[in-house]
Amino acid sequence: MKNILIITTLLWLLNYKFFLSLFTTVSSSYAVLYEIIVYFIILLFLLTLFSWNKIANAIFINILLVISVIGLYFINTMGIVIDGNMLNNVLSTDSSEAFELLDINFYIYVFVCFALLYLLNIKVILKQNSLPLKKYLTYIFAILIVFFGFYKIDRVVFDDFMTDDTPNVAPLFMIPAITDYIIMQKRSVDINKKNISNEYQLNSDSNDTIVVFVLGESARGDRFGINGYYKNTTPNFTNNENLISFKNATSCDTSTLNSIPCLLTRDTHDEYDNVIRENSFVEIYKDLGYETYWFSRNSDQKRIKNFCQEAAVCKYEHDLDYDGELLPQLNEILKNQNNKLIVLHTLGSHIDYNERVPQKYQIFKPLCNVGVSSCEKEKLDNSYDNTIYYTDIFLTKIMDMLKDKKACIIYTSDHGESLGEKSLGIVKRFGHSTPYNVAPKEQTTVPFILWFSDKYLQSKSLDLEKMRKLEDISHDNIFDTVLGCGYISKIKGKTLNICDK
Ligand SMILES: [Zn+2]
């Protein structure tokens, strides 16, 4: 029992970052102390429960310890919340991408922590025979009495504590994370979309219209020079009179797999519950007679691919090295005059940032060449900012291809990205997918850019100056705005089309 107590204490102490963050989110220090003690009792209970015989211990406790130290690395060094969403991201990303997140520090951290806990546990396993059933049951019973004693001490705090669905405490995070993950998997298998195309109509004067929707990845709105960032990351956007950039646009969610279904379909942030119920604007375009194309360098996970498959042509281009290599195909499609919707799902600013940008466009230096959490902030920023600069180059090339046609481009990113900013005063965060209600603004603020060719502006009178002043723009506006660009409107009911505001 003494060793189990030591292992529990060590594991409990390793969760210090989460406990410290509780002090900044929960106003009562008493409630936080209470919670921290209850976590200790639960950990002790869990470890004691599995120590009842050698085999159970050797299998379960060691598995719990491995999961705990891996989880603790992400919680303590990257500020990541491990929930169903995060599990879904990790398990649906191909393993090479997952490894891009890690560096030598990860292996050192996991090895040292696990070795320490494992050595202690070996002692428990070896001594196992000395723990008779009667003694084991007495321990379990005693822990349960203490646990329910705490319930008696403060029922209100206890109830609050039990309804917290994301205890970011190793290894307890596994329980809600695995449950949510299973629910999400079930949902992504049951994609049962209602076709709502008959609620929309194509207006006259829509001839020869080309609409390009560029769906970026992990791009932060505040890193765009045109939005006021101190580095000139978007030199071509800044002087483009046909372009509008909405500074403070917000995303529907913080993860790719949840944000994209929301922004492509009619659901708004407030209505969306991660279930895909209706087809996206892609199928509406197709049903109303447009040629539809979707080219992707990004996720082919079922939740995303089903939208790609709404297009007449759905192509994944995983062999290409850079987003810019999608452009020759775009050029090819533009050769005939028919109406077209083209979706380009890019890798944009996806980690590893240096990999996204051809060398000649890496203008901000020195670069970060180690894992994000071990990198100096300035270097990490440079690597990331180059991806935004390359996005400026990429989109400007598309504008050049379309400038003599009747065309519009809509660009946004699925969510933002944390780059080591401190959130809740304590945790440095990296990446994205923090639960939306506690996510920092770096993860929820996205670029939102509209561009119209001269020919498009001649056929449709738009007050760009008035549009530039619009506020409260978000992913909620994408669905109606993309349709509106192609002269498609809703037969009945209100619209969130920015061009009609
Ligand atoms: Zn994403």
Image: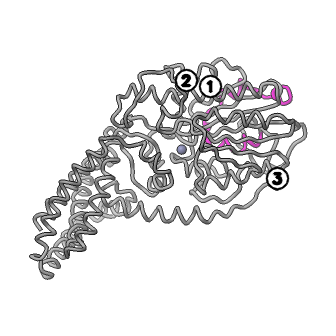
How far apart, in angstroms, are the residues tagged by discs 1 and 3?
33 Å
In this view, 251 is above or below 395? below
1 vs 3, front mark: 1
Q: Is residue 119 above or below residue 393?
A: below
Principal secondary structure, stretch drawn in magenta = helix
Which of the two labelled residues, at mark 2 and mark 1, occupies the earlier sequence position? 2
Q: Name the residue located 52 percent from the left edge and 61 percent from the top edge.
A: 184
Mark 2 and mark 1 in contact? Answer it, CB < 8 Å.
Answer: yes
Circle number at residue 361: 2
- Residue 340 is tagged as none
Q: Is mark 2 within 8 Å of ligand 1?
A: no
Compared across the picture, whether 209 is left or right of 132 comes to: right
Q: Secondary structure at mark 2?
A: helix
Q: Is mark 1 within 8 Å of ligand 1?
A: no
Which of the image's four quarters has the N terminus? bottom left
Q: Is mark 2 in CB contact (under 8 Å) with mark 3? A: no
Across and down, in percent, residue 149 comes to 20, 69
